[in-house]
Structure formats: structure tokens, C-alpha cells
Image: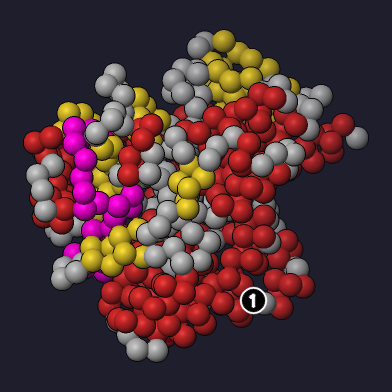
Amino acid sequence: MSKIAVIGSGFSGLSAAAYLSAAGHETHVFEKNETAGGRARQFETESGYVFDMGPSWYWMPDIFENFFADFGHKVSEFYVLHLLNPSFDVIFKDDMISVPENFIELCALFESLEKGSALQLENFMEEARFKYEVGMKKMVQKPGLSLTEFVDFDLMKNAVRLQVFSSFSKHVKKYFSHPKLIALMEFPVLFLGAMPQEMPAMYSLMNYAGLKLGTWYPQGGFGKVVDAMMRIGRNSGAQFYFSSPVEKINVEANRAAGITVQGKEIHFDAIIASADYHHVEKDLLPEIFRNYKESYWEKKTFAPSCLIFYLGIRKKIKKLQHHTLFFEEDLYQHSLEIYKNPRWPQKPLFYVCCPSKTDKSVAPEGHENLFMLMPIASGLEDAEEFRETYFRIMMTRLEKQVGEPVEIFIDFKRSYCVKDFISDYNSYEGNAYGLANTLRQTANLKPKIGNKKLSNLFYAGQLTVPGPGVPPSLISGKIVAQQIIKQLKKNKR
């Protein structure tokens, strides 16, 4: 049995800890914050609001089921899932679209906006289903260590159908011409970290995940998913340490010999860094043992940061669903202001989540729990006056949509932005979602999961394979656990 340290308890760290401890290794997880979950942490107010701090879209339910199945369990043993209907609302300048959970109803909705688009949607989704099946079951399972991993008959045979080298935006426009349908199909990639024009068409698999597999909600919020994953790890003996930031990775004889926590050196046979990759290399490792220079990170394309408001409202809001996208403004222009000309957006798009519509446990009786999120470029100047300016913009548009006052009923308000992502997660330039899934940052072109000079140091999370998002993070933890187990076996020969 080997002794392994996991730095960070986000989804990739929790996943890695679960697999390692189940394989019989002594596993210790060190978390700088007071609770587990990383960006998926929760906080609770004295008045009874429970806020998910980050992820709020539960897509790809099969990935979660696969994780728990690996340990002989089912999701239903840990938390209750609700299939949302409508999946979400989209607000445009002149009207609103409610996206139904039922695919037949969705086809009818498309047909009502553009003649012939129902059949086009069916064809689009059939292609997207194929990409999802191959992409999520084969491609994202690769550790990205060598191009030979892709010498796979099925992958090679279907390379053209996967459309890795085609533009996502052009792909969508082959099927649809109505601007509202295009916006609806392009919105998921806004959070993957690139302009739709620069995103590989392979990522239409996200449309399949959201529009065909459904949008779900775990009762109690994403904190219940975090708790469930911790239970899996603890059941196999994994130990967790909170408010315990790692100060240094100690190197001896060209091996990662251990870590320093609160001034104390602790020996480990291997280390998984699921904290921010750049932070680990820059702040925890001696320079000669880093995989990448600072210039490497400066050239990378990062997914957005966010301005978030957590709001408690002391009344119910009638005309509001669980998920609402405010797309009254131009998606392309907002994307430019994130990726091409980084600045605070002139006419922003934003998103509102109201989980209390589905879950009474996240707000006091008769109250609403609101989460308002606006994607912005990473690295922007983050000042209180900017936050308040955009709070006013979002609140004005929200009140206009629901047709009733909201702001005067706020009894809890907290904002979160670039500075907070840096402070809480050591996030590179305050990014919220990790490394963008552009063609030049896909698969083997992402930062490597293994340290090139220290054979027992590995990386996991949204800055390495397979990429940003909760399901990919679960997979990232599994991939890196498998690699470290192989390495430990090799070292004992």
C-alpha cells in the first residue's frame, strides 16, 4: 500500500481520492478552504438560504452514474434527481422561449420558428449523439500522454464524423438559419471557453447532453454530489484535511517526496495536484521541476471568469423558472468582449438560477434563492463599482422580465468575481472554468497530467485532460488515479 496526497478537493480531487482509496492506497486530501467541493462548494446563511457557489447545470447524468457504479453504488443511494421541465427559459428582446424537456415538443418548438427545422434538429441530434457516445466514452478517457492513444480503430474510422477540425458555428448554421435557434444551440459553448466560430464542431455533443439527455437538479444542490463523493472516499479510508493549504511540494532525488502543510513536512509516495495547475507549478514547485514556463500560460486561451450574485429574496417570484438565460443582447458581441477584446461587456448576456423553484430546502419558506451569473473575460480589473454597475443592469432586466419588483425584497446579497476566484482557488487570472476547449487545446494539446521530471507527481482538474466542467472533472480524477496506480506498480518491479 502506498501513501498518496491529493491537493484540492474539487470534483477531480474527490474522484481521484475515491479511486485511489478503493484500490487500497492510503489517501490524504488537503483542502485550503473550510469545506470540500472546490468551485462546487456551498454556503448557508443564518436565515436559512443554502447557495451552490458554482455549478448549477446537472448535465450528462450517465457520467455520474458511471462514477458511482465503479464503487458498486447508484446515484439514487445518495441524492434525489429531478428532471426539469422546462429545461430552461431563454429571454430574447421580443419574446421568451421555454425549452421543453420532451424532445417531440422541442421539435415542434423549432418547427414553429423555422419551417423544416424539426427534421433538421433530429438530424443534428443524431450526429451529436454519435459524438457524445464516442467523445465521452472513448476520447475523454484518454490520458493525453501520447498520440498513439488515438491509434484506435473506432476513433480513426470515425474521425471525420467527429468533426474535430470543423467550426462549431458553421456546423450549427448548416442546420438552422433562425437567429434564435442559432443562439439556443450556441449558448453551451460560451462556457467552454471560446468563440463558437473557434470551437470544434465535435462539441455539438453538448447540445445532445443538454437537449436530449435532459437538464437535472440534485435535491439539496450540488453540495449533495460533493458529500456523496466524499462518502465514497471515506468508506475506503480516504482522509480529508480542511483549512490546510499546501505550502510546498518537497523534492528529493528527483522525486516528489512529500508536501509541506502548516509548516510541517509530510512524506508521500506520490502526489496528485488537483488544485490550479499554474499555481501548483509556480508557487509550490522549484522552477527546475516545472512542466511549463510562465510564457506558456500567457499564450493559452482560458475560459471565462464570472461575476456572480447570491441573493436571498423575501417573497416568491411568479414568472421565473429554475434556469433562465437572458439573451436580449448579441451573443457574438459579448463573446468578442470575453475572448478577443477583453473588457467589461457593454451589453451583457447573463443567467439566473432559482433553485427554490424546485427545492424548498434551499430557502426559508415563502422566499426565493437566486443565483445571477454574467460571464466575463479572465484577468479583468475587479472593483466594487464594476460589480454594482452590472448588478443594476441585471436586476433591471430581471425585474422587467418578471413584471414585479425584486431588489427591494433582497434580504441577503453576496457578490463573487475575479478577485474571489484568485483568493479562494488560486485561479489563473481568476478564470472560472479552466482552459478553453479550442482545437489547439484539445486532448494531447492540453497541459500534461504527468510531471515530466518527477515520475510520481500528477495533475488533475480543469486545466488538463479532459477539460472544464463537472463530468470531465470526474473523469479527470479517474484517469489520473489509473495512471498513478500504474506508475506505483511499475516502481515496485
The answer to whether 46 appears left or right of 253 in the picture is: left
Give the magenta-colored segment's residue range: 307-335
Q: Residue at x 43, y 32 (%)?
A: 41
Viewer can see residue 101: yes
Residue type highlighted by circle 1:
Ala
Quadrant of the rendered structure where residue 134 is?
bottom right
Horizontal and vertical percent position of residue 221:
43, 37
Q: Residue at x 71, y 65 (%)?
A: 150
The answer to whether 177 appears left or right of 281 in the picture is: left
Q: Residue at x 33, y 49 (%)?
A: 322
| Up-down relation of residue 93 to residue 173 (above or below) | above
From this viewpoint, which residue is outermost toward the right? Answer: 493
Which residue matches tag 1? 159
The answer to whether 478 appears left or right of 382 in the picture is: right
Of 127 and 273, the residue lying toward us: 127
From this viewpoint, which residue is outermost toward the bottom? Answer: 116
Horizontal and vertical percent position of residue 279:
46, 35
Viewer can see residue 173: no
Quadrant of the rendered structure where residue 446 is?
bottom right
Horizontal and vertical percent position of residue 143:
67, 52
